[in-house]
């Protein structure tokens, strides 16, 4: 889709969250597309998320009281096409990172089925990090987990959305970037919904995507087994 980068995954998002989005100025160009695509804006610059295409499908889903609809997420990158390094290096891509202006709602069980978490956190693995700067004593670790658990039993607080970064891994695969502990507790408490927002920076060069996709799929499976 022109200069847009597209998420590697399709997200089942609460229909009402998509219905409130305004149409993008380019919507008429893509009105015949048979997909629902949301273009995230830039929260820090005050640029709003918009709906690129799929309005008729969103309206129909609302009429039929369908709670979730499949959505692709698009973004515009500020990383130059000839820059093949920045997308792969966390510190560099952070300079170009953007966040969606809106909060969206998903079933946490659906996020788990998507296999985009980089780690699984529960009472036994909570706040155990390899980086010594983030290590806690056993008592502090348990206290932090219990505090979060008790607060989430009352329901999910939309002020703390789970961050999903588009094309985070090798510029080819979406992954959860922040919120693994909240994900684990949401599933343990069987919460029906969690709040998510989307962030993005760049995309891998087209010629490298097939091999990088294979590597990314292997890498995320290894990460999930280790933690």
Image: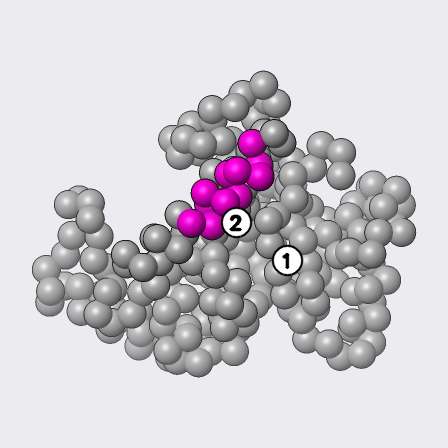
Tag of residue 1? none
Highlighted range, magenta: 208-218
Specify the quadrant of the image occupied by residue 43: top right
Q: Residue at x 49, y 31 (%)?
A: 87
Depicted 190 relative to depicted 217: above or below? below
Is residue 48 visible in the rendered structure shown here? no
Q: Residue at x 31, y 59 (%)?
A: 225
Mark 2, residue position: 174
Lateral position of residue 6 relative to residue 208, left or right: right
Whether residue 160 is visible to the viewer of this picture, yes or no, is: yes
- In the rendering, at what x and y percent does residue 178 appear? 40, 53
Label 2: element kind: strand
What residue do we see at 25% from left, 64% from top?
126
Quarter occupied by the N terminus: top right
Closer-to-camera residue (103/175): 175
Magenta span main SS? helix
Circle 1 is placed at which residue position? 10
The answer to whether residue 68 is left or right of residue 153 is: right
Q: Please tell me in which quadrant of the rendered image residue 4 appears.
A: top right
| Left/right of residue 143 with respect to residue 17 in the rendered view | left
Closer to the chain start, of discs 1 and 2, is 1
Where is residue 191? Give x, y as percent.
46, 78
Instruction: Say which of 223 and 149 sits in front.
Output: 223
- Quarter-wise, where is residue 47 in the image? top right
Residue 45 location in percent, x, y? 59, 37
């Amino acid at each position: 889709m022109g200069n847009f980068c597209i998420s590697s995954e399709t997200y089942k998002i609460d229909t009402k969250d998509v219905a409130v989005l305004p149409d993008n100025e380019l919507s008429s160009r893509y009105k015949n597309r048979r997909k629902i695509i949301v273009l995230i804006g830039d929260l820090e610059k005050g640029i709003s998320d918009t709906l690129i295409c799929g309005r008729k499908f969103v309206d129909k889903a609302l009429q039929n009281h369908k709670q979730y609809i499949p959505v692709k997420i698009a973004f515009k990158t500020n990383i130059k096409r000839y820059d093949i390094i920045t997308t792969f290096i966390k510190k560099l891509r952070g300079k170009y990172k953007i966040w969606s202006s809106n909060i969206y709602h998903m079933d946490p069980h659906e996020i788990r089925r998507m296999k985009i978490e980089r780690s699984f956190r529960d009472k036994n693995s909570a706040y155990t990090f390899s980086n010594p700067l983030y290590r806690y004593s056993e008592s502090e670790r348990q206290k932090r987990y219990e505090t979060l658990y008790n607060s989430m039993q009352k329901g999910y607080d939309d002020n703390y959305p789970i961050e999903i970064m588009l094309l985070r891994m090798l510029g080819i695969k979406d992954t959860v970037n922040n919120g693994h502990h909240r994900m684990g507790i949401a599933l343990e408490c069987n919460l029906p919904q969690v709040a998510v927002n989307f962030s993005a920076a760049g995309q891998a060069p087209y010629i490298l995507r097939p091999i990088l996709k294979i590597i990314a799929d292997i890498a995320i499976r290894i990460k999930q087994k280790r933690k």
